[in-house]
Image (cartoon, grey):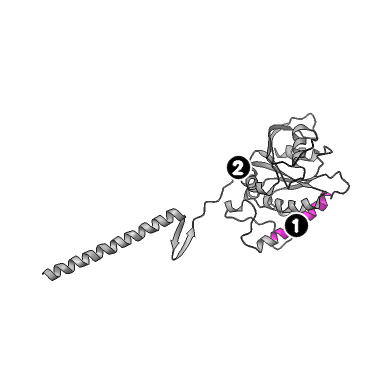
Amino acid sequence: MAGESGDEDTQTWIFLAALSALIGIFVIIAIFKKTTGGKLTGSKVRVVKAAPKVYRKKGSQLLIAGPSQAGKTALFGQLVHHTFVPTLTSINENIENSVPVHDPSDEGGRAKNVTIVDFPGHNENRHQLMNSYVPQAKAILFVIDSVNEKIHKQGAQFLYDILIHPYVHKLEIPVAICCNKTDMHTALSTSDLQNYLERELNVLRQSKSSAPGIEGFGDDDDDEKISLGYDGEAFKFDQLPFTVDFLPVSAKASKIDAISEFVYNQF
């Protein structure tokens, strides 16, 4: 009888030891999941991604964006103060509330009050622009220098990031590409600049699609990747689900009627 009692005690201790080990394993897994944000699947860790942002409503601001030295702040000054003011490269954003914008074809008509944001074009500020200001825009003015070829190249990459932004794409935010300095004899025409940007955007689209993981700004906030244009066809602006207008303007010559008309119609 004593031998049988000893065997039962041994089995009981083995059971309790196994149960303690099993509980310990579950505790370790729970701690691992809490500290790493992952789940165990065999020997692999599955990272739990945050839910993508859901955009349900358009913003209320007019956003002026584009590469540095394209003339954004000068156009901002024309819209706000109705005059040309020489400017330096902006470091911080300029914001003006309740700016009255009139329809150029109806001088005596009622103005619409618009909040205008002029955002600097430095690359180091790009994430702030894409994450904080683009989702507040009701319409976007993208400014590009019609004369400076170096800015054309920079502008294409910048424009690509805006065009594939989930907010712009899903809510169909209208974009006006303001071709600044069109009063100069060395400037490209709006049609030539449009053709140039379509070619550059097509090259960018192809290079990014062939190099997975290289995406534009703002993509890490949305699981759904936005494709530009139609697969198998050269990119054209009319393939986009939102309107893109090319406007001939000149901040220095106070030639901004096309901008005023665009803004008035969107607001």
In the rendered view, does 126 fall on the left or right side of 54?
Answer: right
Residue 235 visible somewhere in the drawing: no
Q: Which mark is residue 254?
A: none
249 relative to 19 in the view: left or right: right
Q: What label does residue 200 carry, if any? A: 1
State yes or no: residue 90 in magenta. Answer: no
Q: Position of residue 265 (x, y in %)?
A: 73, 39
Q: CA distance from mark 2 to mark 1?
A: 31 Å
Q: Quadrant of residue 262?
A: top right
In the picture, residue 173 is in which quadrant?
top right
- Element on which disc 2 rests: loop
Residue 197 is inside the magenta segment = yes
Please tell me the numbered disc located at residue 57. 2
What's under tag 2, amino acid-wise? Lys
Task: Point out the stretch of residues depicted in magenta.
Answer: 186-205
For the N terminus, the quadrant is: bottom left
Residue ranking furthest to the bottom: 3
Q: Can the viewer see residue 204?
A: yes
Instruction: Give, as a three-letter code, the residue at label 1.
Output: Glu
Residue at the image point whose x is 28% and y is 64% from the top: 18
Which of the pair 36/217 is nearer the observer? Answer: 36
| Residue 249 in picture, x, y percent from top left | 81, 42
Q: Earlier in the sequence, mark 2 or mark 1?
A: 2
Task: Give the left or right position of residue 149, taking residue 114 as reference.
Answer: right
Q: Secondary structure at mark 1?
A: helix
- Nearer to me, 240 or 220: 220
